[in-house]
Amino acid sequence: MLCVDFGSTYTKAALVDLDSGDLVATASSPTTLPDATGQGDVLDGYDACVSALAQQDPRALQAEVVACSSAGGGLRVAVVGNEELVTAEAGRRVALSSGGKVVLVLSGGLDDDKLARLRAAAPDVVLLVGGTDGGNAEVLEGDAAFLSRVPWPGPVVVAGNVDSQPLVAELLAGSGTPHVLADNVVPRIGVLAPDGARRAIREIFLSHVIGGKHLSSRTDARGRSFTDMVQGATPDVVLTGVELLARGLDEQHPGAGDVVVVDVGGATTDVHSVVELDPEDSGLAREVVATTPVTRTVEGDLGMRWSAVSTVEAALRDDLADAAARRRRHPDYLPDSDAERDVDLHIAAAAVRIALERHAGRSKVVVSPEGRVVERSGKDLREVDLLVGSGGVLRHGGPDAVRRVLEPATGDAFEGGWQLPRDPEVVVDRDYVLAAAGLLAEQHPVAAHRLVSRLVGAVGG
């Protein structure tokens, strides 16, 4: 089986033996997108990967293909909800866990000004949420009516008050807005139910977004088109791979336990985590929207190139300001000296540490009517068993790079009470097996499990 990730910068491919789960060969090539004159095709990089794989193993030429994509900006999601702190925040979290890049969050009812912001954000999908089941319906129904009057070209995923969904569907259908109904993301206060909306967003991505970006106008040598190959958005597929790594399949195919994955890119730093929640800790949380075992966050101001300046600013590293500015001006820059490689490691370490802090939250002692108690916000990563690093700076670096980038984000003595991993096993996903495993998980679960098992025990990357 040929597993392909059409990335925004590089297309990666892995040839996997489905019987053994072995990684037979890997290849990567720059992703080529159509330019203003119509030249270029997203399959150009794919063809280069297939050619390179075939030199390693001729079976690549005849292999079946499954793919994911973040090319052309990936999946852009705008969230529209009742209020900022509950349903809109719940929608934002669900959109992230669905593999989307959240480009805008609106709340309090749509109006002309918010419509202008929505149009400027140019989302691929609008996630419309609001109200608990049987609760407030006014804002959700009002937003649907507003979108129907515009009318909004769509598509829209509706994941709010289930009692309002028949009316909302009627309004959107009457204006010709493509839409999908899903279970409410907040069926009741304190509960976050992401699965239905995640499936609906995945359906929209495949049916409307992939073809709508016009990234390809041809087929490969065996007549397969880009839209035929792609099964989902890359971050969503990777999160499936992370879940498989953490939980395993059954007693014969166990998982690694609690897992957190941090992927350092040029523009963003993504964190995926699968952590079983302690019921005894639920009373200590002070968040209106519940924490879920499977979580993804995207930090759009943390990265190695396009976001280098904001990364060093967030880290209070004035000494790196000039180097970061150069990297933002030249995002294709590759370090050409030990000093410049050292700068890259400092920027990467800052991005990893800050992204994990934002994902994890913190704990602190507060005085309550019951006396002094520990109050926690965010997701507690302190008992995570495995920390997986990803991104070019780690994949192409040696053990020293792994140590300098990942280890500063681990330990048991952080100022501010940050709930970061105390003593995890540290590995690097050098061969992109998480994306490949996510692509294989549904149809070939045993091979997918064997693939992610490569990461367990690979201490130090």
Image (tube, rainbow, N blue to C red):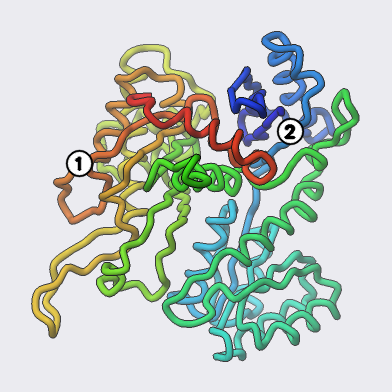
Residue 440: give x, y in percent of width and height.
65, 39
Q: Is residue 224 above or below residue 295?
A: above
Q: Reading the chain from its start, which is encountered first: label 1 or label 2?
A: 2
Residue occupying the point 20% across, 41% down: 411
Mark number, residue 33:
2
Residue 49: give x, y in percent of width and height.
70, 20
Residue occupying the point 71% across, 28% down: 1
Residue occupying the point 62% across, 43% down: 441
Q: Which residue is mark 1?
A: 411
Residue type, label 1: Gly
Quarter of the view holding residue 129: bottom right
Classify 10 Å Cα crowding around label 2: few (below 14), some (14-19), many (20 and above): many
Residue ranking furthest to the front: 252
Residue 233: give x, y in percent of width and height.
65, 47
Residue type, label 2: Leu
Residue 23 is at least partly visible in this image: yes
